Image (cartoon, rainbow, N blue to C red):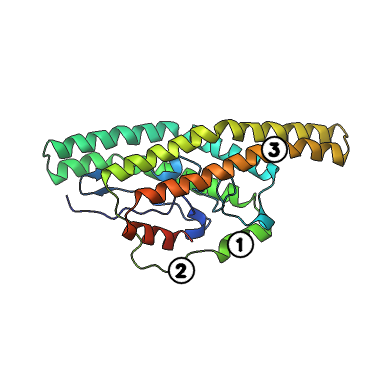
Amino acid sequence: MRAHNVVLCGILLALAACSPSEPVTPTDTVGDVVDLVPDYAVSPAASVDAAGIGGAQFPDALRLTAEQKAAIAGLHAAFMKATAADVAALRVIEQEVKAAITAGKSRGEVRAILDRAAPIRARLEAAFVRLQADIWAVYTPDQRAWIESHRPRSCGPAAVRLTEQQVKQIRALQEEFYAGVKADLELIRSIVDEARQARAAGKSRQEVAAILARAAAPQQRVSDAERALQDAILALLTPEQRQAWLCRHR
């Protein structure tokens, strides 16, 4: 099969590389590499909001508040729950495509299997566009301005070619990240809910602030996990891939 480019406008700084309304393009195939599941459907690690679900990329002056993180985490959780069936269907198609390639099926036969993914991808992209818009609305004007000002310069070819092993490893890292931060994200959301209830009950500003302060530790853990994810992904890339990746994600 003719090699296609793998488009990586996702894992680390999607909105910094794409407009708020532009969906991340899922990958197709690179030789025998089959990668139909978009990064944003696997993990919320900066897949939509430039700063990441933990705000790791924002400068301290624009750090996400606990309320913002709770809102973004809730939007991501709802998106991933709503798209889980489509992601599972794409994984099945991936396996069918790999089996067909291994069995020496014709280009037409492989393409027929891939074509079944088209409407699933379309649904995912439509849901992703809505998610982007919803998260964009959570940001303050200053945070939006920072994202806009940090769009990457033109870097030449818009793709980074990955091997099958790299695709598997990056996916595993993304899934490990999400599993690792899930409890902290839920804790942040519960603290924000508690603060909201305290505010509604007429508690003082100081009392509400004391409740929100408990979110600082889990917020930091999520941010640290995001930075560790970025470092781990970069460690998997060749020098050439790393250069292209960093060019497009800064």
- The residue shown at (35%, 54%) is 7
**Earlier residue among tags 2 and 1:** 1
SS of the residue at dot 1?
helix
Residue underneath mark 3: 215
Left or right relative to 73: residue 105:
left
SS of the residue at dot 3?
loop
Q: Amino acid at mark 1?
A: Trp
Image quadrant assignment for residue 238: bottom left
Residue 153, labelled with which disc?
2
Left or right relative to 161: residue 32:
left
| x and y percentages locating residue 205 in the rendered image | 86, 41
- The residue shown at (53%, 42%) is 225
Image quadrant assignment for residue 245: bottom left
Q: Nearer the viewer, residue 44 or 118?
A: 44
Q: Nearer the viewer, residue 177 or 13?
A: 177
Task: Please indicate, yes or no, whether residue 42 appears anywhere in the rendered image.
Answer: no
Q: Amino acid at mark 2?
A: Arg
- The residue shown at (68%, 31%) is 190
| x and y percentages locating residue 43 in the rendered image | 47, 40
SS of the residue at dot 2?
loop
| x and y percentages locating residue 250 in the rendered image | 49, 61
Residue 146, labelled with which disc?
1
Image marks 3 and 2: residues in contact by CB distance under 8 Å: no
Q: Amino acid at mark 3?
A: Ala
Q: Nearer the viewer, residue 238 or 106?
A: 238
Mark 3 crowd level (few <14, some 14–19, many ≥20, 10 Å Cα): many
Task: Please indicate, yes or no, whether residue 180 appears anywhere in the rendered image.
Answer: yes
